[in-house]
């Protein structure tokens, strides 16, 4: 296992995450087991990290042993599922699956650098392919190293000799680890259900500032009709000017390119009526199905490793919540109020973003601010105001992390809070795994 001289860590937002005592690079599950065992013997906190592409400050690495999971690689196929190493980036995983005639149905709306293990740790519910269901729908099981330390396999794979073809039919702890941010265990492998890629047609449109309220009911209706796999909209602020709403959606069909095109035309017609502006339809469903051409590449923000470039250029702030459609209007109003703050603060670039699924909407505020260290505290104060505004609504944070006010995590019912604490004590008896994570530290009790 490689080890390097510790240096202060930052995430993509460039907030300091602390100076670790040690950074380890395990290449196998055995290496993870050894690292957790050693940290437990010495009584040192241990935090697992991926590519540090989050902007929620999910960890505190101060005097901790940092476990970089990027070396946990590998891809294997068996009985309708693929075991994928937690360190494999999502774009690389999708490419590898497509080489076998499959695909990754959902992934973050990012550059593709995010490790697939981070999708499980964060319980990914925002991004591309949300109408296909959350990541939990596509997971057959996990391999997780707990703080005891023990290696657990979940789903059908917990039965000796049985491939991970299913999660159903027996008590399955897979869901307990989704969203736990490494506080219950370090995800080392994921069993992903195999699904052939669909034919896809991209639809894009523009609308004025007032059309934002019409998007949520339209997206809900279209999602229930199964007309899209991805439906996202953004209101962008550039140099003090609001650019109006830009909508990007994909119709899909698992049967034929002709059906995908027919669905794309229906989606374009209904979107055009709601936006009252121009709508374009791309007609390359076969290329998109093969993972080639501009329509496939458009599902990623840009080139791999552009997260690092973004971090060097600007200080990125963000907050994301999941809201039921009944609360979507209030969540959007909160996002627009945050955008107004950024406009008054003369932020160079910011946006309010909506990612729709058939039964909920992810609402986010994202901003790129000048990357001057002297401004970081004022930026952090601005983000705290956003968090306070959203925490008053009936929403669920996309990730709890360490940022949300106590009144958000304190909404747990007492028995539920006690259950989480007992679960933490059982899986991590000495409390060394990502200590301080609110759901498992008593702060939510």
Image (cartoon, rainbow, N blue to C red):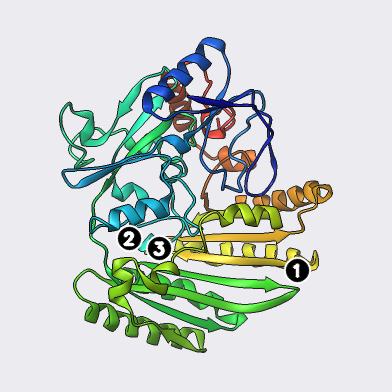
For the image shown, how many numbered marks are present on the structure?
Answer: 3
Residue at image location 43% in from the left, 70% down from the top: 231
Instruction: Give coordinates of residue 419: x percent, y percent.
Output: 43, 27
Quarter of the image for the C terminus: give it: top right
| Depicted 80 relative to depicted 223: above or below | above
Separation of residues labelled 3 and 2 (CA atoms): 8 Å
Separation of residues labelled 2 and 1 (CA atoms): 35 Å
Q: Residues within 10 Å of mark 2 (few under 14, many from 20)?
A: some
Q: Would residue 315 be visible to someone looking at this image? A: no
Closer to the camera, 402 or 217? 402
Whether residues under marks 3 and 2 lie with C-beta atoms below 8 angstroms apart, the answer is: no
Q: Which residue is mark 3?
A: 357
Q: Which residue is mark 1?
A: 343
- Mark 3 vs mark 2, foreground winner is 2
Instruction: Give coordinates of residue 53: x percent, y percent.
Output: 56, 48
Mark number displayed over residue 84: none
Separation of residues labelled 3 and 1 (CA atoms): 29 Å
Give the residue furthest to the top: 41
Residue at image location 43% in from the left, 48% down from the top: 89
Q: Which is more N-terminal, label 2 or label 3?
A: 2
Q: Which residue is mark 2?
A: 132
At numbered mark 2, what does the secondary structure look like: helix, strand or loop? Answer: helix
């Amino acid at each position: 296992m490689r080890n390097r001289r510790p240096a202060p860590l930052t995430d993509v937002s460039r907030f300091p995450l602390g100076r670790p005592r040690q950074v380890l690079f395990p290449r196998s599950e055995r290496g993870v087991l050894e690292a957790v065992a050693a940290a437990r013997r010495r009584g040192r906190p241990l935090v697992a990290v991926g590519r540090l592409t989050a902007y929620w400050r999910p960890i505190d690495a101060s005097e901790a042993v940092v476990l970089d999971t990027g070396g946990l690689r590998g891809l294997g196929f068996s009985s309708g599922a693929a075991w994928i190493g937690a360190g494999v980036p999502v774009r690389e995983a999708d490419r590898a699956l497509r080489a076998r005639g499959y695909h990754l149905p959902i992934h973050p709306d990012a550059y593709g650098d995010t490790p697939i293990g981070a999708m499980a740790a964060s319980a990914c519910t925002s991004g591309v392919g949300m109408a296909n269901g959350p990541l939990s729908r596509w997971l057959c099981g996990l391999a997780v190293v707990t703080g005891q330390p023990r290696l657990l396999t979940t789903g059908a794979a917990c039965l000796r000799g049985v491939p991970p073809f299913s999660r159903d039919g027996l008590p399955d702890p897979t869901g307990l680890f989704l969203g736990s941010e490494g506080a219950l265990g370090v995800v080392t492998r994921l069993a992903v259900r195999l699904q052939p890629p669909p034919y896809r047609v991209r639809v894009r449109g523009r609308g004025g500032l007032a059309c934002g309220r019409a998007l949520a009911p339209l997206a809900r209706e279209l999602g229930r009709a199964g007309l899209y796999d991805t439906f996202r909209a953004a209101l962008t602020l550039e140099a003090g000017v609001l650019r109006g709403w830009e909508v990007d959606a994909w119709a899909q069909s698992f049967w034929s390119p002709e059906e995908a095109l027919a669905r794309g035309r229906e989606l374009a017609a209904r979107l055009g009526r709601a936006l009252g502006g121009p709508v374009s339809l791309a007609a390359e469903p076969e290329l998109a199905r093969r993972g080639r051409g501009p329509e496939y590449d458009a599902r990623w923000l840009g080139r791999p490793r552009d997260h690092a470039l973004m971090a060097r250029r600007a200080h990125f702030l963000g907050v994301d919540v999941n809201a039921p459609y009944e609360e979507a209007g209030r969540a959007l109003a909160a996002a627009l109020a945050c955008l107004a703050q950024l406009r008054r603060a003369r932020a160079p670039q910011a946006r309010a973003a909506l990612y729709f699924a058939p039964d909920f909407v992810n609402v986010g505020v994202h901003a790129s601010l000048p990357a001057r260290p002297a401004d970081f505290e004022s930026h952090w104060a601005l983000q705290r105001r956003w968090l306070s505004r959203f925490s008053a609504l009936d929403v669920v944070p996309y990730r709890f992390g360490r940022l949300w006010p106590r009144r958000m995590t304190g909404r747990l019912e007492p028995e539920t809070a006690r259950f989480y604490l007992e679960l933490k004590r059982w899986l991590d008896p000495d409390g060394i795994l990502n200590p301080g994570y609110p759901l498992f530290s008593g702060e939510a009790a």
